[in-house]
Image (spheres, grey):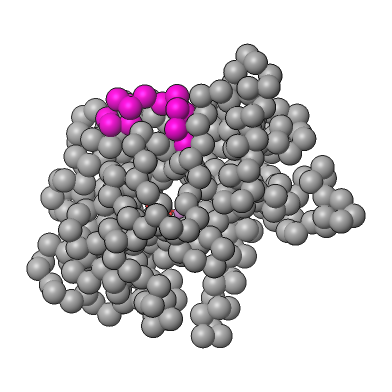
Amino acid sequence: MVTSVLPRVESLASSGIQSIPKEYIRPQEELTSIGNVFEEEKKEEGPQVPTIDLTEIESEDKEVRERCRQELKKAAMEWGVMHLVNHGISEELMDRVRKVGQKFFELPVEEKEKYANDQSSGNVQGYGSKLANNASGQLEWEDYFFHLIFPEDKRDLSIWPKIPSEYTEVTSEYARQLRSLASKILSALSICLGLEEGRLEKEVGGVEELLLQLKINYYPKCPQPELALGVEAHTDISALTFILHNMVPGLQLFYQGKWVTAKCVPNSIIMHIGDTIEILSNGKFKSILHRGLVNKEKVRISWAVFCEPPKDKIILKPLPETVSETEPPLFPPRTFAQHIEHKLFRKTQDNLSN
Ligand code: OGA
Ligand code: NI
C-alpha cells in the first residue's frame, strides 16, 4: 500500500524552516538565472509579453476584425503567449473563481488531504504535490489541485472541493465561458493559417472531445526563493492554456535567450499556445518555454486551464496546408499520449547526459 508521506510544500513553508530541503534546490547552472521576482517584474527594458485586446475579434466590420486577428497572429507567432484583455469574461466572475479557489486552499492541510490524488494508481485528479520523477529527486515549490472541468459529462463532481459551497457553481460557469473563448481563439487562429474557421477546433477534438483541465497552482512563501522554482521550465502540452492569478508576479517566459518576467495586467487572462497547436501549425505558432518563480513575502496562486485533445483518438501532425516544399513538417505524427511519452523520454535522456 502506498500512503501519502510527502509533506505538502505548504506544511514545509509554515513549519518555520529558514533553509529549504535539498530536493527543492535547483541545479547550479539554473541558479544563476533566478532572481528576486519583484525586482524582475519592475524591469521596463527589453522585450515584454504582448497584450492583445479582443474587443474587435468578432466585429461586424471585416477590416476591423482582420486587424484584431493580425495582432493575435503576430503574438502567437512571435511569443506564443500573451495577456488577453477584453476577452468577454467578466471581472466579477474572475474574482469569484479566485475567491473560491483561495478559500479552498485556506482550509487546513488535513482537510485538503481528504481530496489527495494518488498518482501511483493513476488517479491524477485532486490535491497533490509533484513527485520526483528522476534520480536527482528534484521537487518544485508548490502544491496544486487538479481536475477536469469541461465537457460537463466527463467531470467527476465527487472529487471537486465541497468547501466553499459555491466552488462547483462558480468553477463550472468559468469553464463554460472559457470553452467559448477557446472556440473564438481557435477560429481566429484557423483563419490566420488560411484554414476554414472551424478547422483547428475540429482538429483538437471539438466540443465533445477537447478537455479542459483546471490546475490551481498554490505557491507558498519560500524562505530561499532564489534557490527554488515554483514550476520548472517547460512548455505546455495543451492546445491552449488560459491562466488567471492573484496578481503576485511569478511567471517567466524564455524569449530570445533570456527570461522575461510577465507583468501583472489587471483583468487579463494569460494565454499560451501549447505544443498541440504548435504541431498542427507546423511551428508557425510557438509553444514557449516558461517557468514560475516563488518569493518570500506573498503566497502566489494561479488558475491554469489546459485545453487538451483526447489522449489516443487523434493523431497530431502538421496540417497539410501548413507544409510545403520550403516548409517541411517539423514534427512526426504522434497521438497526444505519445507526445507526452516522447517528452518524458527526452527529459530522461537529458538527465542521463548531465
Ligand atoms: C503551468 C504553469 C505558471 C503559473 O501550470 O503549466 O506554467 O503562472 N504555471 O503558475
Ligand atoms: Ni505551463
Question: Is residue 92 in the magenta section?
Answer: yes
Residue 76 appears in view: yes
Q: Nearer the viewer, residue 28 or 121?
A: 28
- The N terminus is located in which quarter? bottom left
Residue at screen point 63% across, 23% down = 65
Residue 209 appears in view: no
Q: Nearer the viewer, residue 230 or 260?
A: 260
Residue 12, image quadrant: bottom left
> Taking 281 as reference, is 221 above or below it?
below
Horizontal relation, residue 88 to residue 19: left or right = right
Q: Nearer the viewer, residue 23 or 301?
A: 301
Q: Position of residue 133 (x, y in %)?
A: 43, 71
Residue at screen point 22% across, 72% down = 224
Q: Position of residue 71 (x, y in %)?
A: 60, 37
> Taking 14 as reference, is 111 above or below it?
above
Give the magenta-colored segment's residue range.
84-96
Residue at screen point 68% across, 19% down = 62
Q: Position of residue 276 (x, y in %)?
A: 62, 49
Question: Is residue 297 in the magenta section?
Answer: no
Horizontal relation, residue 293 to residue 325: left or right = left
Horizontal relation, residue 41 to residue 188: left or right = left
The single residue placed furthest to the top in the displayed view is 60
The single residue placed furthest to the front in the displayed view is 45
Residue 352, image quadrant: bottom right
Number of numbered labels in the structure image: 0
> Taking 299 as reference, is 240 above or below it?
above
> Taking 330 as reference, is 208 above or below it?
above
The single residue placed furthest to the right in the displayed view is 325
Q: Nearer the viewer, residue 75 or 128?
A: 75
Q: Position of residue 196 (x, y in %)?
A: 75, 29
Residue at screen point 87% across, 51% down = 324
